[in-house]
Structures are given as structure tokens and as C-alpha cells.
Image (cartoon, helix red, strand yellow):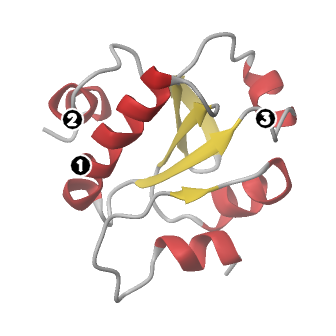
Amino acid sequence: MTKCLSRCFQESRNEPMIADVTDRDFDDVLEQSAVPVLVEFWKPGCGSCRALLHELEKLEPDVTGKVLILKMNVEENFQIPAELDVQSLPALALYCQGAFERFIGGLGVKEEILKQLRLT
């Protein structure tokens, strides 16, 4: 298991923790995940990105075991955002069985994200 996945599945954490993923470990994480993977593409200084991350942190307890939530800093990682042609931030991408499925639209509150994930 990669360090990223190990951090995501820590048994004894008290607070939600959405792990960072990089271009380098991205494919390994997708291959090893038994559940769909939701990735937030963000950058430092982006207020909307911080707001979305806060909503994802609220969402995480509701989707544990159903969806793995990760985040990728686009200022440090270029390959994956370029492959997806990410042009505006924040962006949420859903991967199923290791392959890109779709972008999650209507970014906003926890309930809307759950609806987009079809988990409600």
C-alpha cells in the first residue's frame, strides 16, 4: 500500500484527513483503491478551493468505505491536471475502477456533492 493510501485509511484518526496525491503516486493510488476516487484539484490562495475542501472534510465521514477523497495541488503537479484539461479551480474529478469517469459539477455544499456522487 502506498504512503498516500496508508494515510487515507488510518484507523485511529480523530479528524477527517484528506490526503494529498501527486502526479507520481496518482496511478498507484487509483489501482489500489477498491472504491471510487474523488480528487479535488486546488491551488494555494484559492478561496473557493478552501471552501470546497471544507465541504469535502464534512462529507468524508459519510462516504468512508464508499469513496476515497484526495486532493492535488496543481501548482506542484502538472501532468494529471493537464491530461484532464483542468482549466478552472476548484475542480472535482471522479475515478471509477482506475479510470476517469467524469467531473462533478455544481460545486457547493456537502449535500450537493453527495447527490452528484449518487450516494443519497
Q: Earlier in the sequence, mark 2 or mark 3?
A: 3
Whichever of labels 3 and 1 marks the residue nearer the N terminus, that label is 1
Q: What amino acid type is highlighted by mark number 2?
A: Lys
Q: Residue at x 81, y 41 (%)?
A: 76
> Where residue 2 sits in the image (x, y, percent)?
70, 76
26 left or right, relative to 32: right
Q: Nearer the viewer, mark 2 or mark 3?
A: 2
Decide: marks 2, 1 in contact (CB < 8 A)?
yes
The residue depicted at 44 percent of the width and 34 percent of the height is 50
Task: Specify the label residue 110 is tagged with.
Answer: 2
Mark positioned earlier in the residue sequence (2 or 1): 1
Disc sitting over residue 88 in the figure: none
Disc 3, SS: helix
Which three-letter amino acid code belongs to the residue tagged 3? Ile
Q: Secondary structure at mark 1?
A: helix
- Seen in the image, is 52 located left or right of residue 44? left
For the residues labelled 2 and 3, the Cα–Cα distance comes to 25 Å
Kind of residue sitting beneath label 1: Lys
- Residue neighbourhood size for the residue with mark 2, other residues' Cα within 10 Å, grouped as few (<14), some (14–19), many (≥20): some
Q: Is residue 108 above or below residue 41?
A: above
Q: Which residue is mark 1?
A: 58
Give SS at disc 2.
helix
Q: CA distance from mark 2 to mark 1?
A: 7 Å
